[in-house]
Image: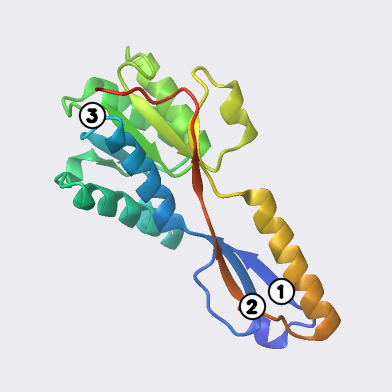
Amino acid sequence: PFLDAAPCPVAIFDSSVEHPELINVRSNDEMGLYLSTKYMINHGHTQIAFVADYASSPVLTKRFLGYQRALEECGIPFRPENVLTYPPSYEGGIEAGRKLARSNLDVTAAVTTADICAIGVMEGARLGGYRIPVDLSIIGYDDLSLCRYTTPKLTSVSQHITEKALLATRLLIEKIKTGKISGPATVETDVEIVDRQSVVSLF
């Protein structure tokens, strides 16, 4: 109802809402966790935890599906016990890290849906006696600047946040000037792994 009556063009990020008047810029969330999970597999990890209460969010659900797809593609059985449904926050990450350190899951790697959660996992695992990345490899999501200041520096999935903002702004300006946009209103942007120090190879 708001979009139907909006007095100006509207842009939104990472939404599943479909509307002909809505500019929607979103990244390929399914691909993001597919890439991070595949990255772990390519480094020899087969017991890989997924950390997020994914059912609460369409975005996180897409990322969970990427995790599942990478496992299936590589012939690795999906293990429900390796899914830790904690909030993708620093505090949720700490709880997940503590659980991994005290469990008997034999998990050697974890993929997350937020950098702040990954940093929490690192801290929780350390509090449980783990060494990062020797005992647990970890990948974040978003590639925030703080990834460069953790110990070890955090490998992450970049969704090119600045470029997404620039794209949305350009589309808004085009629609303000012309009343329409020349391309699709929903645009999906690429993601990529930014390699740092938080993943070790088991080979």
Per the image, the residue denoted by label 2 is 22
- At label 2, the amino acid type is Leu
Q: Of helix, strand and loop, which one carries label 3?
A: loop
- Tell whether 20 sits left or right of 89: right
Q: Of helix, strand and loop, which one carries label 2?
A: strand
- Confirm whether residue 131 shows in the render: yes
Per the image, the residue denoted by label 3 is 107
**1 or 3: tag closer to the N-terminus:** 1
Q: Residue, x 28% and y 49% (percent of image)?
A: 70
Q: Of helix, strand and loop, which one carries label 1?
A: strand
- Mark 2 surroundings within 10 Å by alpha-carbon count, few (fewer than 14), some (14 through 19), many (20 or more): some
- Mark 3 surroundings within 10 Å by alpha-carbon count, few (fewer than 14), some (14 through 19), many (20 or more): some
- Mark 1 surroundings within 10 Å by alpha-carbon count, few (fewer than 14), some (14 through 19), many (20 or more): some
Vertical placement of residue 173 versus 120, above or below: below
Vertical placement of residue 47 versus 25, above or below: above
Label 3 to label 2, Cα distance in Å? Answer: 42 Å
